Amino acid sequence: MRNRTAEPRRRSIAGGGSTALQTSIAGGGSAARRGSAARRGSAARRGSAARRGSAARRRIAVAAAATLAAATIAVPAALAATDGAAAKKGAAWLARAVPAATGTGQSADTAVALRAAGTLSSADAAARANGLRKGARAYAVTPGAAGKVALGLVALGASDPGCAGGVDLVAKLRPKGNGRFGTTIFDQTLAILALKALHRPIPSTAVRYLQRIRGAGGWSVLASQSDDVSSTAMAILALRAAGVSAKQATLVKGVAWLGAQRTASGGFALGRKDRSESNSTALAIQAYAALGRHDDRALRALRGLQRGDGSFNFAPTDSGSRVIASTDAVAALAGKHPPVVSLRRPAGGC
């Protein structure tokens, strides 16, 4: 999900454009009607000329409106194609970099990214699901890790995604009495997202706990640490997956804090604003998408971190883990946010 060891759609500019066009057309029409009324009783020739002028003005206004509407529609379409192409290029690199036989958290994240980009073949999906199942006993020891495996298996279209290699993922996704999963924000958020993907009930205590642990503005990995972009984005994603309204007070405050962390280049980073980082930027893009927003500035910043081979650097001058950077980046550029796929019926455990 991010480079760590603990580790919209676009608000259409057609909305603003449409309003402007309607105002323009209505204004012209009103003026024409007022002019026509003032000239009533004048000579028939002047009245006829005024009507012809009014009709001409209306034709010009309509033509201008059509031209502007076409331009308004074309811009988002062009940007989306660019994002989609970048996502597929990144997905192709990931498919080569992360073998199907591995069964780690990176394998699960890769499965989600490939599904988001729409590049998974049925054979590759089956092989990757088999790899995840084989590695589950060693990897899925925390709620967050179990959540990743579940999210990966659901994205791969695997049968019985609540059971992996004899590990009952559903049982591992049960919170404590106070609604807490594990020890970190990633345990809490990944567990909630996995329950959503598995079509399992999300305990209200877990949602309230996540809301309660918000810090001064956003969320942090641990209560003792400072709020950070990635943790905040994950919290927003989990709360939205749990059905929390975008207008809910805690969520609104968290979103406001997230927006204030934007870097000079338009993306996001952990604890700094002098550069953009792939994982924080990608997670912020996905969080905004879950709120129905589209962040063009962050998407441009994220595309700027893509290398020629399709992979993504962690930061402009720091390659970091290109696999971890690329899994988040691909899903974000594909216009998807977790859970990328959700079951229609509740999954069972082992």
Image (cartoon, rainbow, N blue to C red):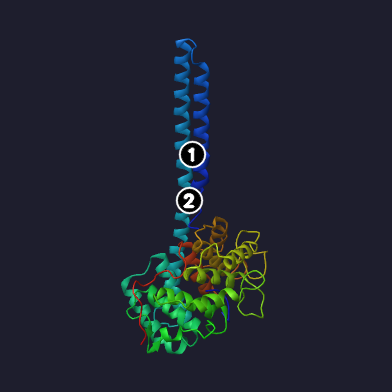
Look at the image and tell me in which quarter the C terminus lies: bottom left
Residue 85 falls in which quadrant of the image?
bottom left
Badge 2 marks a residue whose secondary structure is helix
Q: Is residue 18 above or below residue 33?
A: below
Give the CA distance from mark 2 to mark 1: 13 Å
- Out of 238 and 8, give the one closest to the viewer: 238
Residue 204 locus on image (x, y percent): 49, 76
Q: Residues within 10 Å of mark 2 (few under 14, many from 20)?
A: some
Say which residue label 1 marks.
68
Amino acid, disc 1: Leu
Image coordinates for residue 270, horizontal then vertical, percent: 63, 70
- Image side of residue 274 versus residue 85, left or right: right
Check disc 1: other Cα within 10 Å, few if <14, some if 14-19, many if 20+: some
Contact (Cβ within 8 Å) of mark 2 with mark 1: no
User: Is residue 313 visible to us here?
Assistant: no
Q: Which mark is residue 76?
A: 2
Total tally of numbered discs in the picture = 2
Above/below status of 17 relative to 280: above
Instruction: Give x and y (percent) for residue 178.
Output: 54, 83
Res. 88 in view: yes
Q: Residue at x 67, y 81 (%)?
A: 224
Left or right, 333 with respect to 349, comes to right
Amino acid identity at mark 2: Pro
Q: Earlier in the sequence, mark 2 or mark 1?
A: 1
Q: Secondary structure at mark 1?
A: helix
- Residue 151, which numbered label? none
Viewer-closest of 106 and 188: 188
Counting from the top left corner in percent of width and height, residue 118 is at 38, 65
Residue at left 48%, top 50%? 76
Q: Nearer the viewer, residue 184 or 275?
A: 184
